[in-house]
């Protein structure tokens, strides 16, 4: 297995069509649910961004971002991250980081002041490394389990 620097050098992150996200989302995030559970209502919106991480021609990671206000914060121009998934054998190798950084760059270019996400407890440390903070108490998203809302402001 290549080390982190070798692997991430072979990864390219680029926009993809939303249907390309479904298989990886389903297998990684919602394997015990019907395949339709990996399709989100916001996927088709014109202001949504879907990124894919490719190792050569193989899609190994996906992330989606949607214009959606965070309901616990005052109105604004917010985006939501949803459906980040990386092939299990390639997790913790920098692919999620590359996708998140590219997505955050895209949001900053559009002067989005705040991005948020519902995060599984196992992923909170990952998001904290990139400036996200917890907003509110832990909550349950059946059948996915406990989550936290995390936010990152570009205006602080």
Image (cartoon, rainbow, N blue to C red):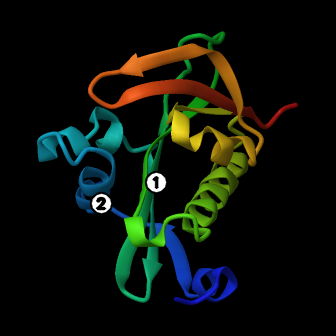
- SS of the residue at dot 2? helix
Residue annotated with mark 1? 63
> What is the x, y in percent for residue 29?
33, 47
> What is the x, y in percent for residue 74?
66, 10
Task: In the rendered view, tell whether residue 91 sits above or below residue 141.
Answer: below
In three-dimensional space, the C-alpha distance between marks 2 and 1, rounded to whole angstroms, equals: 10 Å
At x 36%, y 74%, the residue is 59
Label 1 crowding class (10 Å Cα cut-off): few <14, some 14-19, many 20+?
Answer: many
Label 2 crowding class (10 Å Cα cut-off): few <14, some 14-19, many 20+?
Answer: many
Image quarter where the C terminus lies is top right
Q: Earlier in the sequence, mark 2 or mark 1?
A: 2
Residue annotated with mark 2? 24
Task: In the rendered view, tell whether residue 138 sits above or below residue 123.
Answer: above
Task: In the rendered view, tell whether residue 75 sits above or below residue 100.
Answer: above
Res 140 seen here: yes
Task: In the rendered view, tell whether residue 140 sits above or below residue 89.
Answer: above
């Amino acid at each position: 297995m290549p080390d982190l620097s070798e692997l991430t050098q072979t990864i390219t992150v680029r926009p993809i069509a939303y249907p390309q996200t479904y298989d990886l989302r389903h297998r990684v995030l919602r394997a015990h649910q019907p395949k339709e559970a990996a399709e989100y209502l916001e996927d088709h919106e014109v202001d949504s961004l879907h990124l894919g991480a490719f190792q050569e021609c193989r899609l190994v990671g996906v992330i989606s971002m949607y214009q959606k206000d965070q309901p616990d914060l005052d109105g604004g121009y917010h985006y939501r991250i949803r459906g980040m998934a990386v092939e299990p054998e390639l997790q913790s190798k920098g692919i999620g980081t590359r996708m998140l950084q590219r997505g955050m760059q895209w949001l900053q270019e559009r002067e989005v002041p705040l991005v948020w996400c519902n995060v599984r407890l196992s992923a909170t440390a990952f998001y904290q490394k990139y400036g996200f903070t917890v907003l509110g108490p832990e909550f349950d998203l059946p059948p996915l389990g406990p989550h936290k809302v995390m936010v990152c402001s570009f205006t602080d």
